[in-house]
Image: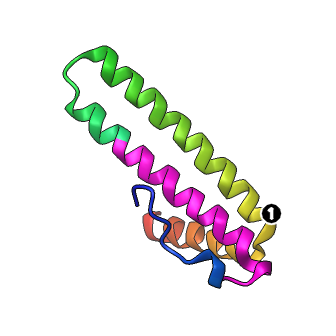
Amino acid sequence: MLSEIPIDLEKVSKEDRDAEILRVGMIAELDAVNLYEQLAAMAEREEVKAILLDIAKEEKTHMGEFQALLLRQDKEQVEELEKGKKEVDELTE
């Protein structure tokens, strides 16, 4: 993503806008996690690697904050997450 919002939020209805904003935030945080982990893998100095991995971990927390808010707002998302968990459990047992 790298700072480009993948949806025109002005075209989203006002009732759905906050949920979409939260999803964009989640995308940005996951993108940051990927970036920092890739940079850490390339870093030569251990202190640089450690800092990048620590920052990536913080971004995962931010993603969780966005997800927690989204799940309060979008009950269909809650249901679909549960379905996904069940499917994984069934396929991996």
> Which quadrant holds residue 33?
top left
Give the percent coordinates (x, y) of residue 17: 71, 74
Give the percent coordinates (x, y) of residue 53: 40, 30
Q: Is residue 85 above or below residue 39?
A: below
> Which quadrant holds residue 23?
bottom right
Secondary structure mainly formed by the magenta segment: helix
- Which amino acid type is shown beneath numbered disc 1? Arg
- Range of residues picked out in magenta: 12-35
Q: Is residue 41 left or right of residue 14?
A: left
Residue at 47% from the left image edge and 52% from the top image edge:
30
Residue 17 in view: yes
Give the percent coordinates (x, y) of residue 74: 75, 73
Residue at 45% from the left image edge and 70% from the top image edge:
91
User: Circle 1 is placed at which residue position?
Assistant: 72
Q: Name the colouring of the figure.
A: rainbow
Q: Is residue 49 above or below residue 63?
A: above
Q: Is residue 46 above or below residue 53?
A: above
Q: Is residue 1 shown in magenta?
A: no
Number of labels in the image equals 1
Q: Is residue 21 shown in magenta?
A: yes
81 or 28: nearer the viewer: 28
Give the percent coordinates (x, y) of residue 77: 68, 73
